[in-house]
């Protein structure tokens, strides 16, 4: 049973990697968005945080250095959400139904899809880090803190992939994905510490945005990654990320259960409307 399950995991991950390798524009589109923020937006605010030292930094930093971990998070976030679009597409084409009828526990199949999403997210994040370094914004990824950075990045990729998996339960048609962009992705990104620290939000008087950002799981994913880059303790952020991962994956597995949600479609008679 275990060798069969591992073979299925490998097959699903390799299928997604092979599909991604044929989508030449997907990597480019994944990199253009954060690189525009880094090269254009950050250029106008390069020294906005030069007047203050914020954790986990021990000295003054330019703005592009501050937002770089947030832009890595952007890559992970958008790929995690794009995975939900791919799930909806596979469901409409019937591929997902065939996959879910495999003689394996359904949570394991969903976990395999989640692992495939995380692998693609991390590959795109590595590509962004390399290009950002070529543009002059180098992150301390390699060194004594590399295991901490990898743990934070993998956990963030899995959490955001699990969120995308959960959204795919409730998105019934591809046309509804635009609403997901407007009501999930953008608020989650902009109401976080990806672009500005929490103290800036509180200092500016944006109280409700500050509170939303505090409880936003994406904030804690970015902060865990940001602190890990410098070998600092991220506080409760790792636990919030891991807790959100387990919660989203558990709810997604419940939603894909054969007795409810999408799984119930597999029990419809062949001629049912």
Image: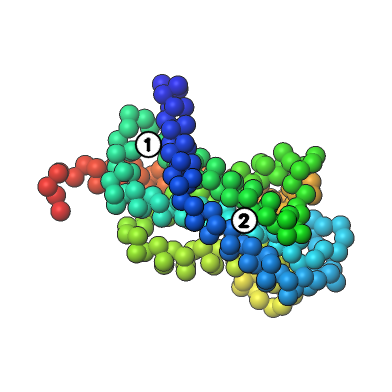
Name the residue at the left extreme. Answer: 271
Image position of 100 with respect to 3: above or below = below
How many C-alpha atoms fall within 10 Å of the one at disc 2: few (<14), some, or many (≥20)? many
Residue under the image location 51 percent in, 40 percent down: 115
x, y (%) of residue 179?
A: 41, 67
Is there any visible trace of residue 96 in the rendered image? yes
**Residue 249 in sight from this viewpoint:** no
Name the residue at 32% across, 49% down: 91
Spot occupied by residue 216 in the image (x, y as percentages of width and height) = 59, 60
Q: Mark on residue 249?
A: none
Secondary element type, mark 2: helix
Please report the residue visible at 30 percent of the width from the left and 35 percent of the height from the top. 101
Which residue is denoted by mark 2 in the rendering?
73
Place of residue 243 in the rendered image (x, y in percent of width and height, measured from the top left): 57, 46
C-alpha distance separating marks 2 and 1: 28 Å
Q: In this view of the protein, which residue sits in the foreground, 34 or 234?
A: 34
Split into 4 quadrants, where in the image is the N terminus?
top left
Q: Name the residue under label 1.
A: 106
State the scheme by which the image is colored: rainbow
* Mark 2 or 1, nearer chain start: 2
Furthest toward the bottom, the residue is: 205
Vertical side of 36 occupied by 96: above or below: above
Q: How crowded is mark 1: few (under 14 residues within 10 Å), some or many (20 or more)?
A: some
**Label 1 element class:** helix
131 in relation to 195, above or below? above
Q: Which residue is drawn at 46% across and 55% down?
A: 82
């Amino acid at each position: 049973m275990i060798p069969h399950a591992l073979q299925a995991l490998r097959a699903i991950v390799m299928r997604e990697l092979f599909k991604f390798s044929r989508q030449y524009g997907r990597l480019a589109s994944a990199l253009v968005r954060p690189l525009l923020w880094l090269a254009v937006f950050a250029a106008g605010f390069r020294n906005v945080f030069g007047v203050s030292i914020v954790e986990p930094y021990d000295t003054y930093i330019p703005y592009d250095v501050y937002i770089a971990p947030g832009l890595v998070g952007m890559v992970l976030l958008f790929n995690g959400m794009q995975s939900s679009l791919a799930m909806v597409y596979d469901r409409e084409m019937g591929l997902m139904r065939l996959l879910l009828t495999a003689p394996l526990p359904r949570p394991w199949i969903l976990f395999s899809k989640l692992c495939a999403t995380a692998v693609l997210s991390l590959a795109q994040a590595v590509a962004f880090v390399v290009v950002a370094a070529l543009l002059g914004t180098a992150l301390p990824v390699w060194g004594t803190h590399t295991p901490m950075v990898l743990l934070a990045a993998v956990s963030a990729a899995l959490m955001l992939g699990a969120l995308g998996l959960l959204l795919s339960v409730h998105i019934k048609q591809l046309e509804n994905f635009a609403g997901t962009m407007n009501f999930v992705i953008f608020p989650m990104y902009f109401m976080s510490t990806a672009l500005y620290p929490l103290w800036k939000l509180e200092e500016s008087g944006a109280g409700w945005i500050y509170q939303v950002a505090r409880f936003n799981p994406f904030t804690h994913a970015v902060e865990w990654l940001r602190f890990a880059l410098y070998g600092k303790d991220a506080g409760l952020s790792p636990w919030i990320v891991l807790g959100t991962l387990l919660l989203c994956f558990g709810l997604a597995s419940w939603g894909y259960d054969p007795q409810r949600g999408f799984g119930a479609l597999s029990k419809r008679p062949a001629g049912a409307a």
